[in-house]
Image (tube, grey):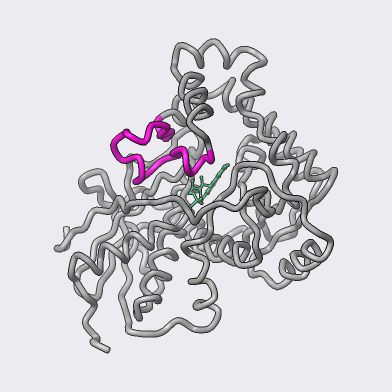
Amino acid sequence: MSSEFPSDAQFLDSLLTEASRAPSVHNVQNARWSFIEEEVQLWADNSARLPVADPTGHDDRLSLGCAWEGMALAGLRRGWRLSAPDFVENWGDPPSKSCAGTRLMARGRWIPDRPNAAETHLLEWVWKRRCHRGNFRSPALDQARLWHEGLTRLSFRFQSLHGKDLKWLNSLGDSAAAELFRETGYPEELRHWLKLNPAEEGYHEWGLNREVLGLNAWEAKAVEIAFRPSVMQRIRASPLISVLSAEAPKANSAWAVLLLYAPLDEDPFETGRRQYRFWLELAALGLCTWPLSAAVDVPSARKQLEAKFLTPPGQRLLNAVRVGSPDQEKGPTCRRTPRSLWRRSEL
Ligand SMILES: Cc1cc2nc3c(=O)[nH]c(=O)nc-3n(C[C@H](O)[C@H](O)[C@H](O)COP(=O)(O)O)c2cc1C
């Protein structure tokens, strides 16, 4: 094998396309990359920040960690291992050098190597994993037993809730989402990330498009109308907002909801790297994810959640994720075109 990291456009394009399979909050695709011989630089797109939904930048950094892991897995498939990130901007630092709307976050190096057995297994799921926002199928007893057993072997700290607890949490999440819609600038912020018309520029590059949200053409039209500023202004103050933001009618069919925990002092970037692998492990078990960030992000809901389900010592509640098997076979993950900048020289 050549020890020189390829620099031709076709290779880099396929690498970036595969790396962009990694999840990001609202599918903002906030990672930008540059490749300078064996060096990789990860840049953060400042315009992908979500000041209302993510005021501290936690999810922004977590998404960058997912992206790093996406790049690492894409490299491994091609015979290159990405070194551990060397951070330019650490968690909690003031923003680093900003250039053309991006900040340099971390550097790494490619080293020729092959994936190990666990990584080879994860690679099988990169193109098949996707979030599912819809109805779930009720599993047969054998299937549920296999899931229970499978979950005990996974790498993330969590507790799984079922039945009444799942429904309680979905209802809490819906109330939290309605509060976000009613009382904050969340609808305006979310509207920017909705991409409901396939003819729109960048439809396959970023944001919550119809495929990501699992909407048919009629549903997409209804959402588009509801999010028009003049319409939203009226419905956000009315009981209709609870209908618009309600996920429980579908999410109650999930098999379980997992409360995810991360060490109190863990950098969200590292959490994001582990979380992406965890989501791939769930996909390998046949489980699709449907996150419920509102229940954890809205302080009043989080308080109730933490009072009912105690957080293990030394851990923090990271997120809640519904899991199950979709009620109908879905195609592979939706198409995604990388949104990265390539820079050839140090800035
Ligand atoms: C930190 C984080 C928080 C997320 N929160 C939610 C959420 O509250 N609701 C939701 O439906 N999806 C949530 N997602 C899922 C993303 O929207 C999803 O991963 C993205 O749209 C890409 O789609 P894919 O995972 O199907 O590839 C979250 C993802 C991340 C990384």
The residue at the point 79 percent across, 40 percent down is: 167
> Which quadrant would the C terminus be assigned to in this image?
bottom left
Q: Residue 176 falls in which quadrant of the image?
A: top right
Residue range in magenta is: 192-214
Marks counted in the figure total 0
The residue at the point 77 percent across, 51 percent down is: 138
16, above or below 80, in the image: above
218, above or below 85, in the image: above
Give the left or right position of residue 319, taking residue 340 as reference: right
On the image, the x and y values in percent for residue 76 come to 40, 76
Q: Which is nearer the eye, 44 or 178?
A: 178
On the image, the x and y values in percent for residue 214 come to 53, 40
Q: Residue furthest left?
A: 345
Q: Residue 235 falls in which quadrant of the image?
A: top right
Give the left or right position of residue 189, taking residue 17 as reference: right
The residue at the point 66 percent across, 51 percent down is: 317
Residue 302 is one of the magenta-drawn residues: no
Residue 24 seen in this snapshot: yes
> Which quadrant would the N terminus be assigned to in this image?
bottom left
